[in-house]
Image (tube, helix red, strand yellow):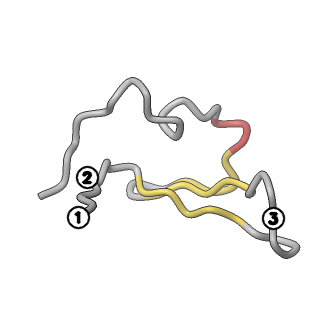
Amino acid sequence: MVNTRRPSDCPFCHIDDNHKCFQDDLVFTIKDGFPISPGHTLIIPKRHIPIHLC
């Protein structure tokens, strides 16, 4: 089940639209702060997905 609540400590919820390279209803992309290669971007889902580590 996907969590639709936006936690206040989520670093991706506070990214300014000017930094987004692409955006649609499901995802947005930003340039990586420490790119491995030219054009390295992060694809970030707009819905929060809980991570359960064992």
Amino acid of disc 3? Pro
What residue appears at the point 55 percent right and 63 percent down from the top-left corner?
A: 43
Q: Quadrant of residue 36?
A: bottom right
Cβ–Cβ below 8 Å for labels 1 and 3?
no
Task: Give the residue displayed 39% in from the left and 24% down from the top.
Answer: 8
Residue 50 shows which numbered tag? Answer: 2
Q: How far apart are the two marked residues, 1 and 2, measured between alpha carbons?
A: 13 Å
Single out the residue that lies furthest toward the left: 1
Viewer-closest of 28 and 9 = 9
Residue 27 left/right relative to 41: left
Residue bearing the label numbered 1: 54
Q: Residue furthest right?
A: 38
Considering only order in the chain, which callout, 3 or 1, is on the residue closer to the N terminus?
3
**Viewer-closest of 6 and 53:** 53
Q: Element at badge 2?
A: loop
Residue carrying label 3? 35
Mark 2 vs mark 3: which is more N-terminal? 3
